[in-house]
Amino acid sequence: MIRSAVYSCAFAAIGTLSLPAIAFAADDPLLKATTLLKAGHAREAYALLGPQAAERADDPEFDYVLGLAAIDSGHLPEAILALQRALAIQPDHAQARAEIARAYAMAGDVNTARREFSLVAGDPTIPDPVRQRFNGLVRGLDKVNKPGLSLSGYVEAGAGYDSNVNAATSASQLVIPLLAALGPATLSSNAQRQGDGFGLTEGGLSVEYGLDRQSRLFASVLGSGHVNFHQRAFDQALAVATIGYAYTTLSHDVFSLSAQSQRFWIDGSSYRAANGGIAQFTHVLGAQRAISVSGQVFDIRYQTDPLRNAKRYSGALTYTDGGYSANVSGGTEQANAAASKYLSNGFVNGRLAAERPVAKSTTLFASFSIEHRQYQAPDPLFLVKRRDTQFDASAGLRYRLSRQFILSPQLGYTHNASNIALNRYDRVTTSLSLRLEF
């Protein structure tokens, strides 16, 4: 945002220097519009000239002043069109070219803005102080999304304890309404809460390739493994691959589209696959502040239980401010099979997270989230529509041993409240991990 203000100041200097050189008839609205612009009343100037655009289009003096008024009043598409008309008739109109460069820059078209900047910076009719400002702006544009290949990644290993590795109820017996006449059902050990120590490994690799100063391709792979010391039937592994395209505007806003594939294993066997797409827009509000919106569509397939196959649609809104963030998301997961509609649900989630340095090499972090899931049809065994509300909280420290190595102890707690007793559970996890970043 500061950079945009610098652009405006630099170009405003050109506009102020050039406007008096244009001749107007005494009763011409251009004279009044020019006076309004000099006084800083761009909206009034645009309102005066805008209705005349159809009649006076292709008059380069009119289009130039209209373009100035449109830029400074926030009508960038109209400004670009007006200045394009002026330049089509007078291609050597340096001031018009300067202003159209500013319009492209404010609209986020870095490549076109840079090209126009270069043309204007070399024009001998531009005063030296203004040309110097342009040269500085061009150097700034060269730093936006520098083309080329970049690579980053990390590996992490650790160990910990999980009080409920299978996310199961602590009850040993339950009354199932459909089978109530048979009395309470005794749950198998795998259906009851099991605690165990575990080892964890995780790693990721990200690759970016800048196509130009605004566009880039990106790809990443992430893998993780969670191996229990004794309850090996609940060992888990996850792999995620992502590929996409991102476009960065001059104000650092980012549009991105990506495709993602996820694979999840339990006890060494493929359990679930999900493939889909993600669209996201991030708007920079200021230093360390941003807001982003995203949408996701995924097709979910269960290898051993195809009746659970579903489509998942979700959206999210996130606000970040330095080390703090707030996120609200929601959506729906719809089972493909008519017989499985009791698994279809709508969900909404809220999450708060924060991290704060507490010493030179130590950062404290914490997060809290609530998710509510409302299912759409009665469960065939429990004869009611399932409702879950899940609470998650975690906290920990990141201690930077060196530029690349980070030691992190962490504590987490989950409580899932449900109107179906089988789905109620609590879980506490503790872990200590060492991470290498490169």
Image: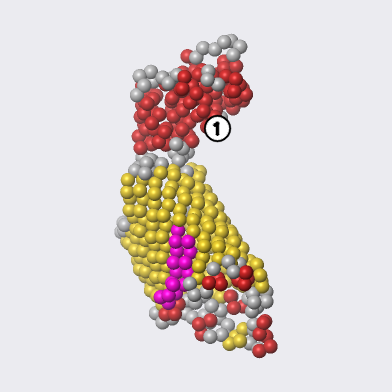
Q: Which residue reaches farthest bottom?
A: 182
Q: In front: 346, or 195?
A: 346
The secondary structure type at the circle numbered 1 is loop
Q: Name the residue under label 1.
A: 74
On the image, the x and y values in percent for residue 5 come to 47, 33
Q: Which residue is drawn at 52% across and 25% down?
A: 82
Q: In this view, does 216 lie to the left or right of 65?
A: left
Q: What is the tally of numbered marks visible in this picture?
A: 1
Looking at the rendering, the stretch of residues picked out in magenta corresponds to 260-275
Q: In which quarter of the image is residue 432?
A: bottom left
Q: In this view, does 314 lie to the left or right of 126?
A: right
Q: Residue at x 50, y 51 (%)?
A: 279
On the image, the x and y values in percent for residue 218 come to 39, 52
Alpha-carbon neighbours of circle 1 within 10 Å: few (<14), some, or many (≥20)?
some
Q: Is residue 352 visible?
A: no
On the image, the x and y values in percent for residue 339 come to 62, 72
On the image, the x and y values in percent for residue 275 come to 48, 61
